[in-house]
Image: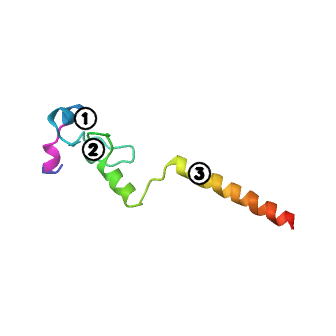
């Protein structure tokens, strides 16, 4: 564990109470990162970095929207092809 993580509170409540923006539990997030977390949201800092840079995790809602678009576009193209 690095020196700056040792100084952080160990839970979200403690971070908010002391006015600190981050805390460190030592437990991995659901994606396996063992890094500090934001006190306001509880999100892993490493996950946020990866998400911000476009690497990694797409939401299920976004995947569902893409799939819906692909299906509707395919249906429209098929209808145009049969209309000729």
The x and y percentages for residue 6 are 14, 44
> How far, Cα to Cα, is label 2 from label 3?
29 Å
Earlier residue among tags 2 and 3: 2
* Residue interval drawn in magenta: 4-12
Earlier residue among tags 1 and 3: 1
Label 1, residues with CA under 10 Å away: few <14, some 14-19, many ≥20: many
Residue at the disc numbered 1 = 12
Tag 2–tag 1 contact (CB < 8 Å) = yes
> How far, Cα to Cα, is label 2 from label 1?
8 Å
Q: Residue at x 75, y 63 (%)?
A: 77
Q: Secondary structure at mark 1?
A: helix
Q: Which sits in the foreground, 17 or 4?
A: 17
Q: Secondary structure at mark 2?
A: strand
Q: Residue at x 39, y 48 (%)?
A: 31
Tag 2–tag 3 contact (CB < 8 Å) = no
Does residue 6 lie above or below 57 as drawn? above
Residue at the disc numbered 3 = 65
The x and y percentages for residue 62 are 53, 51
Place residue 79 in its image quadrant: bottom right
Label 3, residues with CA under 10 Å away: few <14, some 14-19, many ≥20: few
| Outermost residue to the bottom | 84
Q: Is residue 33 left or right of residue 69?
A: left
Q: Is residue 83 left or right of residue 76?
A: right
Q: Give residue 38's mark.
A: none
- In reply to whether residue 26 is colored magenta, the answer given is no
The x and y percentages for residue 21 are 21, 43
Mark closer to the observer (1, 3)? 3
């Amino acid at each position: 564990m690095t020196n700056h993580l040792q100084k952080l509170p160990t839970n979200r409540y403690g971070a908010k109470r002391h006015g600190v923006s981050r805390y460190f539990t030592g437990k991995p997030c659901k994606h396996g990162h063992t890094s500090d977390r934001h006190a306001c949201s509880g999100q892993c800092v490493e996950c946020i970095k990866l998400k911000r840079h476009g690497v990694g995790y797409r939401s299920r809602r976004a995947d569902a929207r893409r799939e819906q678009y692909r299906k509707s576009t395919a249906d429209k193209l098929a209808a145009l092809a049969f209309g000729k």
